[in-house]
Image (cartoon, rainbow, N blue to C red):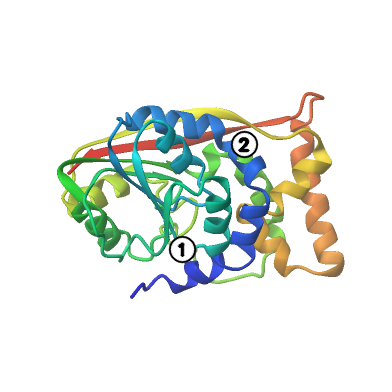
Amino acid sequence: MSSNQEQIEYWNDRAGETWAELQDRLDALLAPLSAAALAAAEVRPGDQVLDVGCGCGDTSIAMSAMGAKVLGVDVSAPMLARARSRDASIEYQQADAATMDFARAFDLVFSRFGVMFFDDAAAAFQNLHNALTSDGRLLFVCWQPPARNPWMATAGRAIAPYLPSSDEAPNSRAPGPFAFADARYVEQILQDAGFSRIRIKSHEESLKVADTLAEAVQFQTRVGPAARVIAELEGDKRAQALAAVEDALRPFDRGSGLHLDSAVWLVSAEA
């Protein structure tokens, strides 16, 4: 049984429904990063591939088109429904890859932003290591620190003053987008799980967040760290927070769409 119940509930409620609704836009936004991850994965025809946190199926569909036999796994029913509607020939399973028992061994475990949400990352990667063939490989992409990802962090910083005050320091390694921002932490997890030949490569891209400032504000407050905060605000406080996001994003509105920088780790390893 999965211990990651909070994340499972979150991705089966508002977040999963929103990502399914915005699938086209999110895939377009992340396309440069997806392309970099897929190139680094070196998918071969006939590969048995496990796509962890496959979401709405974008990378599963891409790897299937490369000739791989793909199993896409995700905890989110709304996102998997969207994935199946896009390509019914691909096998998808609603499960937590951190704890599920796999019926077959895989040549490649792949993930685009799906592994940072494990409640127990060490145990999860031990389970994924066990899912690989003896010469299998791992490739995933994860976010570097917020400071290197203004496309996501700009709105989050603008909204921060409207958060309830807390005496507790945030846990930077708690499940979430930036849980794997520390490359040394990621390397240690993989070593402990039994992986070898671990390589962590930095990759940067400028992402087109939106065509207009108004569109950017709406988008940033529906997905990413800012979305959870906005959902909890009401009345004047919510209006002030939205205005703060707009002010923070305005300098990036230069008439040709809003482009903001991103930085990820491309993490590869062998069984």
Task: Say which amino acid is labelled 2.
Answer: Leu
Element on which disc 2 rests: helix
Q: Residue at x 36, y 72 (%)?
A: 2
Would you say 199 lies left or right of 29 here? left
Q: Is residue 34 above or below residue 48?
A: above
Residue 144 in view: no
Q: Quadrant of residue 151?
A: top right
Q: Which residue is nearer to you in this view: 184 or 65?
A: 65
For residue 44, side relative to residue 164 (left or right): left
Q: To which residue does mark 2 refer?
A: 29
> Label 2 neighbourhood size at 10 Å, few (<14), some (14-19), many (20+)?
some
The disc placed on residue 75 is: 1
Looking at the image, is 168 positioned above or below residue 18?
A: below
Q: Is residue 13 left or right of residue 177?
A: right
Q: Which residue corresponds to the image point at 83% horizontal and 51% vertical from the top-left?
A: 243
Q: Nearer the viewer, residue 154 or 213?
A: 213
